[in-house]
Amino acid sequence: MTPVETLLRDIIEAKGPVTFREFMDIALYHPEAGYYTSLSAQIGEKGDYYTAGSLGPLFGKMLAIQLAEMLEMTKTNTLVEMGAGNGALAQDILTELSAQGVWINYFIVEKSPSLMEIQRERLAEFDVTWVETIHELPTVSGVFFSNELVDAFSVHLVEMTEDGLREVYLGWDEGFVEILSEPSTTELTAYFEELGVRLPVGFRAEVNLKARTWLKDVASRLLKGFLMTIDYGYPSHELYQDYRRRGTLMAYEHHQAVEDIYTRVGQRDLTAHVNFSALARWGEDFGFSVTGFTDQSHFLMSLGILETLSDGDTPEEIKVRLNAKSLLLPGGMGEIFKVLIQHKGLEPFPLSGLKFLPQRESCRL
């Protein structure tokens, strides 16, 4: 048994079944043994998963173009990255902005002590301020952004039954045992009603209520500016299709997707697809309007990624082209990853990254 499994067993035996959200929260974020808060989380070739920022500096360079434009529109120099991983993306963004002669007041919100330590070492040459929570930030005008943050929030797991919506709880009997029972909060039923979603009997889905709290927290610190969320997922009409009737929860280890999420707990990444319709809808409650919604491929092509590529045959030039292909590939990162941009306290602006919008249904909120 892993340390997290032992801890959860003891909690269940002492207090009774826990919600899946509690299980996932401990598995990922327990201060000593959680996947992200310990040294378990590994990004890149030798780790458990790739991010766009781990495929070389090209993604960060493109992102810097869009961020600089947003800052110019907001008339500020404050950038807030939420969940910076190993700091590679921040390094690429700051390097590119520095090359452009743009001075940035850069904040990183990071709750993982181990990741913060890695980030500090990588970003030692830059002027960066770290905070553990959004509430520690000053109230600012500027740009808040994240890359693969929301998919890692702990989620409630629900299933529609003949008797109505039920939530998944976990008991213990020589291993984790799922138990369907009454929802722990009325917010779960309200979630589907608010989005106009009717789940058929037998359909299982995740509900990321933490994302709503996160949006509220961001809005409380952002006076005027943009919020850019880059993650994998779909709007409601795509997310709740019949072929996803078992939900989207997956565990990842050494770049392999593992359907059994109840083994090696705390030593594997756990994720669920983001519902971008929910982010857009909830954002309205906190003063955000949707600037635009697109996929990563169209976003990067709008910013001119293809024009930056050389047709040379050196190993480095070939590597850059291969990385660009990974970022843009339909059916891969280019299509699955979406970019939702929201604004607050501003008139809507045409952004360069939204120049070429896709026609696919999966990119319509």
Image (tube, rainbow, N blue to C red):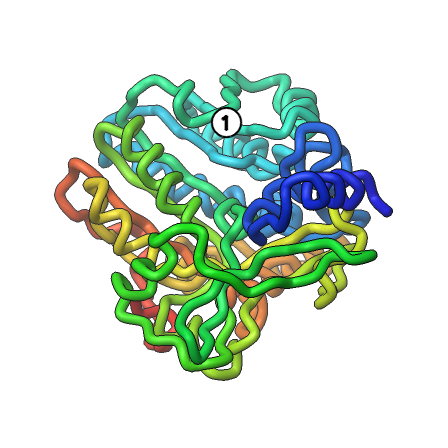
Q: Position of residue 94 (x, y in %)?
A: 51, 30
Q: Position of residue 45 (x, y in %)?
A: 77, 51
The kind of residue tagged 1 is: Ile
Q: Is residue 357 visible?
A: yes
Q: Is residue 31 above or below residue 291?
A: above
112 with respect to 133 (left or right): right
Which of the 4 quarters of the picture holds residue 5?
Answer: top right
- Circle 1 crowding by C-alpha within 10 Å: few under 14, some 14–19, many from 20: many
84 with respect to 251 (left or right): left
Q: Is residue 306 visible?
A: no
Most extreme residue toward the right is: 1
Q: Nearer the viewer, residue 310 or 262?
A: 262
Residue at 44% from the left image edge and 71% from the top image edge = 239
Circle 1 sits on which residue?
108
Task: Give the quarter of the figure containing the C terminus.
Answer: bottom left
Residue at 45% from the left image edge and 23% from the top image edge = 106
Residue at 41% from the left image edge and 60% from the top image edge = 275
Q: Secondary structure at mark 1?
A: strand
